[in-house]
C-alpha cells in the first residue's frame, strides 16, 4: 500500500513538471515574438524544454500504467538515478546547441549523439553493475547507435514465484531518490518560467523590453535542464536493458521447465484439497509429532493407516499448511508428490524431476545460487538438447536443497508406487544426505516392506487409528447431510441416526463412508432409508459387492469393459474416450467394429454404470497431459477408478472366486488383450487417405489407440486369434489404414518410418512376427531407429525373434 501511494505521488510530481514545461514552451514563443534579439536563445530553451517534456511523458506512462506491475519496475530505474547522482556520472554537460530534431526525439544529448550517449551509458552501466546490475547489460551499450526509445511498457517480466527487481528496503530508498530529482527539476523549470514572464509586453510594445537573462545565463540553464534530461534518459535506457534481461531470464526458466519434463504433481493435490472438509485434520496438525517434525532438524515423519482412512486428504492439508508457511518465508521451500496406482510410467527419475521443478520455481525467492546449478546444467546440455542422468538429477536436487534454510518434501501413498523397492531406495538415499534442513514426510498403508525400510529412518510415526479419524468423519458426514440436496431433506432425528450409524460402522475408513452416503442418496423413502441403514455392509469389499450386484443386466458388458480399461490402461482416459471404447466391439463377427451410433448421447452417463467405483477428475497441469483428454468443453478431465482399493478388489482372488460376481474379475492378461483389440479395431476405421490435424476431437481415442496398442499386445497374449487377425489387417504395408496409423503414431512420439516386421520384432511379439513373415514380409527391410528388424530384436534382447529372423534369411550384415 505504501509503495502504491509513493508511486502515485511520483506520478503527480511528473505531471506537475510536465505542465510547467508546457508553460515555459508557450512563454518562449511569446518572448521570441516580443524580443527579436532573443530568438536564438528562445529557440534553444524551447527545444531543450521540449526534449525534457518528452522524457517526462515517457516516465509518466511507465509509472501510471498497470500499477501492480509498474511499481515492481521502478526500483531499477530509481537505483540508476541514485547511481547517477552519487557517482557524478553525467559530469558537466556540453554547451553545444541542440538541434530541433534532437529535441523532438527526446534525447537531450548534445554533440555527436551516438558516441556521446554510448560513452555515457557505459560509465553509468559500469557503476550500475558495481551496485548490483548484471553483466548482460553490457550488450545494451553495444547497440546504442541510434536514438533510444525510453518509453517502457508496463509488463513486469519476472520469473514465477518471485521478482528480480529488488527487495523492500531498496524500493523504499529508490522512492526517496526520484521525488528529489523531480523536485530539483521542477524548481529549475519554475525559475525559468518566472524569468519569461511577459506581462509588460501587453502594456506597451513600444517600450524597450529589458532582456531577462544575464550574459551566459541561458547556457547555464540549458546545462542544468540537459543534465536532468540525460539523467532520466539513461535511467530509462537501463530500465529497458533490465526489462530485456528479465525477458531473457524468464524465457530461460520456461525452457528449463520444459526440459525437466516433470510429471503432473498438482492435479491430484488440488482434487484432494477440494474434497477436504474445513476443520478436519486438526488432531494431526496440533499434535506433538507434527509440530516437532516441522521444527526439528533432519526430521522424517511416517503417517500410516488402513485403506480408505483418508491419508491423501490429510496429506493435502499438510501440504497447504507448509506451503502457507513457505510463502511468508523465502528461505523455506516445499515440494510434494502423490503416487498413484494409475500412473504406471512413473519412475524414480520422474519423482526427482517433479521435486526439482517445484523447488526451482521457488528458487526465485531464494539466493541466486539456488538455481545457478540447474542453469549451468541446462547450458552444459546444449541448452536442453541433452537429458539429465539419474545421478545428475540427484545432484541437482541436493544442490537446490542445500540453499534453503528449510526444505519440506512430502510424499503421499508410497504403497501405490509402481516399483516400490526402487522408490524406497531413493527415499533412503535422500535421507542419507544428512541435511539438517531437510524434513521428509511420507504416507502409506502399514505394509511390511515399507515398515522394514522406514523404521530405521523415521524420527516420528503417526498411525491413523479410528479413534483419531472419527472426529473428521463426523465433520464430513455433518457437512454432507447439510449441503447435499438428497440428504438434507431428512429431519434432524433422521440425520442424527445416519451420522451415528455411519461413524459406528466406518472403523476409521473415510472411503467406506463415502460409498454408504452414495447408497443413501438413492433411497426414495424413509422406509428405504431405514432398510439401507439396517443392512450396511461391514467392509469395503462387501460394499463393492453390492455396487456390482446393483448393475442392471443390460449394462454388465459395458461395466466390465470400462472397469478393465481403467484397471490396465497405460495412461488416463477421458469420458469422451470411454464413450469410444464402449462404441467399439472387437469381437463383432459381422459389420463394422466401431459404430458411431453406439456412442452415449451424454458422456457423463458413463458415471452411472459403476456408481462409486469410478470418478471423474479435473486436471490442472496441462503441460503433462495430452490434449485428447479434453472433455469436449475445453477442460482436461480424467476418468479413473475411485480408489486404489477398487483396483485391488477387481484383480483379487476374492472376486475371481465369487459365486455371483466372478464375471467382473479383471485378469491382467485378458484385460490387456481386450484393450489391444479395442485399439486396433478403432484404428481400422481410418481407411480414408486424409487425416485432419484435429482428428482427436472427432475421434478422441485415436491418439491413445495409435500409441499404445503394441504395448497392450504383450508377448504372452499375442496368441489370441482375434487379436492376431486384427493386427495383421492393420499391418498391411501398402494399405491406407497402415499409413494412417503411422501418421497418428508419429504425431505422438518420434519414430522413423519402417516396415511392420520392425515394430513386432522390437516389441518382442514372436507369433505376430512369424505371421508377418509367413505372409510375405521382407525380413531385411531397412528403416526405424535400429536400422532393421534383426538389429531391433537383438538390441531389445528378444532372442527367440532373432532366431526366427535368421531362419527366415535375415542378413546379419545388412
Image (spheres, rainbow, N blue to C red):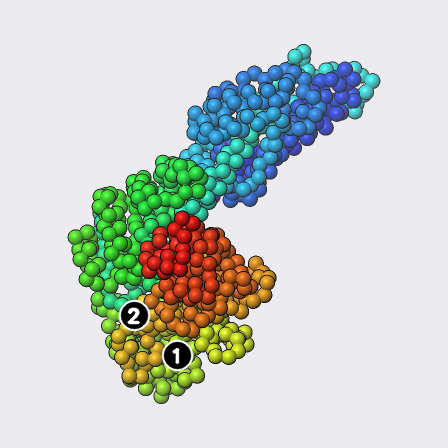
Q: Residues within 10 Å of mark 1 (few under 14, many from 20)?
A: some
Q: Nearer the viewer, residue 675 or 697?
A: 675
Measured as percent of width and height from the top left, residue 524 is found at 41, 85
Q: Which numbered circle lies on residue 262?
A: none
Residue at 33% x, 50% y: name it.
349
Instruction: Give the spatial CA distance, label 1 vs label 2.
Output: 26 Å
Q: Residues within 10 Å of mark 2 (few under 14, many from 20)?
A: some
Name the element at disc 1.
helix
Residue, far right: 206
Position of 182 with respect to 316 (left or right) is: right
- Say if residue 131 shows up in the picture: yes
Residue at 56% x, 22% y: name it.
118
The numbered mark, 1 or 2, whose residue comes first in the sequence reads: 1
Measured as percent of width and height from the top left, residue 782 is found at 47, 52
Measured as percent of width and height from the top left, residue 616 is found at 42, 68
Above or below — where is 389 with respect to 551?
A: above
> Where does label 2 land, which residue?
648
Residue, far top: 215
Q: Nearer the viewer, residue 383 or 615?
A: 383
Nearer mark to the viewer, of 1 and 2 = 2
> Where does label 1 land, which residue?
521
- Say if residue 180 shows up in the picture: no
Amino acid at each position: 500500500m505504501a509503495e502504491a501511494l509513493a508511486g502515485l505521488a511520483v506520478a503527480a510530481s511528473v505531471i506537475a513538471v510536465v505542465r510547467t514545461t508546457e508553460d515555459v514552451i508557450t512563454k518562449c514563443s511569446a518572448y521570441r515574438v516580443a524580443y527579436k534579439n532573443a530568438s536564438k536563445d528562445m529557440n534553444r530553451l524551447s527545444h531543450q524544454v521540449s526534449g525534457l517534456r518528452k522524457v517526462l511523458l515517457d516516465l509518466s506512462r511507465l509509472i501510471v500504467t498497470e500499477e501492480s506491475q509498474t511499481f515492481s519496475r521502478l526500483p531499477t530505474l530509481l537505483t540508476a538515478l541514485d547511481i547517477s547522482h552519487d557517482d557524478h556520472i553525467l559530469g558537466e554537460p556540453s554547451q553545444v546547441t541542440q538541434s530541433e530534431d534532437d529535441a523532438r526525439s527526446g534525447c537531450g544529448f548534445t554533440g555527436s549523439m551516438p558516441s556521446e550517449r554510448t560513452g555515457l551509458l557505459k560509465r553509468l552501466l559500469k557503476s550500475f553493475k558495481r551496485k548490483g546490475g548484471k553483466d548482460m547489460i553490457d550488450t545494451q551499450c553495444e547497440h546504442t547507435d541510434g536514438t533510444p526509445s525510453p518509453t517502457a511498457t508496463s509488463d513486469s517480466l519476472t520469473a514465477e514465484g518471485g521478482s528480480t527487481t529488488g527487495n523492500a528496503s531498496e524500493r523504499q530508498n529508490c522512492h526517496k531518490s526520484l521525488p528529489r530529482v523531480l523536485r530539483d527539476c521542477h524548481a529549475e523549470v519554475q525559475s525559468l518560467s518566472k524569468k519569461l514572464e511577459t506581462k509588460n509586453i501587453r502594456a506597451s510594445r513600444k517600450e524597450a523590453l529589458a532582456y531577462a537573462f544575464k550574459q551566459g545565463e541561458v547556457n547555464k540553464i540549458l546545462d542544468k535542464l540537459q543534465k536532468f534530461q540525460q539523467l532520466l534518459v539513461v535511467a530509462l535506457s537501463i530500465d529497458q536493458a533490465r526489462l530485456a534481461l528479465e525477458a531473457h531470464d524468464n524465457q530461460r526458466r520456461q525452457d528449463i521447465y520444459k526440459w525437466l519434463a516433470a510429471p503432473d504433481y498438482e492435479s491430484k493435490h488440488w482434487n484432494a484439497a477440494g474434497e477436504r472438509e474445513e476443520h478436519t485434520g486438526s488432531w494431526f496438525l496440533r499434535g506433538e509429532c507434527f509440530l516437532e517434525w516441522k521444527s526439528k532438524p533432519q526430521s522424517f515423519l511416517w503417517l500410516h493407516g488402513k485403506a480408505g482412512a483418508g491419508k491423501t486428504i490429510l496429506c493435502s492439508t499438510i501440504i497447504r499448511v507448509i506451503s502457507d508457511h513457505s510463502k511468508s518465508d523465502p528461505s523455506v521451500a516445499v515440494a510434494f508428490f502423490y503416487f498413484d496406482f494409475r500412473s504406471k510410467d512413473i519412475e524414480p527419475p520422474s519423482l526427482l524431476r517433479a521435486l526439482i521443478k517445484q523447488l526451482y520455481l521457488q528458487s526465485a525467492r531464494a539466493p541466486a545460487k539456488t538455481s545457478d546449478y540447474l542453469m549451468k546444467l541446462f547450458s552444459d546440455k546444449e541448452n536442453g538438447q541433452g537429458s539429465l542422468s539419474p545421478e545428475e538429477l540427484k545432484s541437482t536436487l541436493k544442490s537446490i536443497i542445500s540453499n534453503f534454510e528449510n526444505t519440506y518434501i512430502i510424499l503421499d501413498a508410497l504403497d501405490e508406487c509402481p516399483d516400490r523397492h526402487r522408490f524406497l531406495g531413493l527415499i533412503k538415499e535422500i535421507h542419507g544426505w544428512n541435511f539438517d534442513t531437510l524434513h521428509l514426510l511420507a504416507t502409506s498403508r502399514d505394509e511390511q516392506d515399507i515398515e522394514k525400510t522406514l523404521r530405521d529412518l523415521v524420527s516420528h510415526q503417526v498411525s491413523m487409528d479410528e479413534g483419531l479419524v472419527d472426529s473428521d468423519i463426523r465433520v464430513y458426514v455433518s457437512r454432507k447431510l447439510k449441503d447435499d440436496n438428497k440428504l438434507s431433506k431428512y429431519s434432524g432425528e433422521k440425520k442424527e441416526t445416519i451420522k451415528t450409524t455411519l461413524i459406528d460402522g466406518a472403523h476409521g475408513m473415510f472411503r467406506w463412508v463415502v460409498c454408504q452416503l452414495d447408497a443413501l442418496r438413492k433411497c426414495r423413502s424413509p422406509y428405504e432409508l431405514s432398510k439401507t441403514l439396517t443392512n450396511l455392509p461391514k467392509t469395503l469389499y462387501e460394499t463393492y459387492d453390492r455396487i456390482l450386484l446393483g448393475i442392471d443386466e443390460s449394462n454388465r458388458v459395458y461395466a466390465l469393459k470400462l472397469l478393465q480399461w481403467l484397471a490396465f490402461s497405460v495412461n488416463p482416459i477421458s469420458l469422451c474416450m470411454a464413450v469410444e471404447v464402449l462404441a467399439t466391439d472387437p469381437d463383432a463377427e459381422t459389420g463394422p467394429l466401431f459404430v458411431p451410433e453406439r456412442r452415449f448421447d451424454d458422456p457423463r452417463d458413463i458415471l452411472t454404470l459403476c456408481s462409486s467405483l469410478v470418478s471423474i477428475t479435473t486436471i490442472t497441469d496441462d503441460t503433462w497431459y495430452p490434449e485428447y483428454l479434453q472433455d469436449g468443453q475445453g477442460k482436461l478431465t480424467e476418468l479413473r477408478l475411485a480408489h486404489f482399493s477398487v483396483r485391488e478388489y477387481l484383480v483379487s482372488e476374492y472376486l475371481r472366486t465369487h459365486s455371483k460376481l466372478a464375471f467382473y474379475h479383471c485378469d491382467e492378461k485378458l484385460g490387456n488383450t481386450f484393450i489391444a483389440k479395442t485399439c486396433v479395431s478403432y484404428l481400422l476405421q481410418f481407411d480414408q487417405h486424409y487425416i485432419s490435424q484435429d482428428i482427436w476431437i472427432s475421434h478422441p481415442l485415436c491418439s491413445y489407440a495409435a500409441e499404445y496398442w503394441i504395448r497392450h499386445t504383450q508377448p504372452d497374449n499375442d496368441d489370441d486369434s482375434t487379436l492376431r487377425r486384427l493386427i495383421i489387417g492393420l499391418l498391411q504395408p501398402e494399405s491406407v489404414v497402415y499409413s494412417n496409423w503411422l501418421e497418428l503414431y508419429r504425431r505422438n512420439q518420434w519414430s522413423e518410418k519402417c516396415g511392420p516386421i520392425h515394430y513386432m520384432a522390437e516389441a518382442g511379439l514372436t507369433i505376430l512376427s512369424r505371421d508377418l513373415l509367413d505372409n510375405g514380409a521382407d525380413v531385411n527391410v531397412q528403416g526405424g531407429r535400429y536400422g532393421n528388424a534383426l538389429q531391433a530384436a537383438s538390441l531389445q534382447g528378444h532372442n527367440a525373434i532373432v532366431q526366427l529372423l535368421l531362419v527366415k534369411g535375415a542378413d546379419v550384415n545388412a
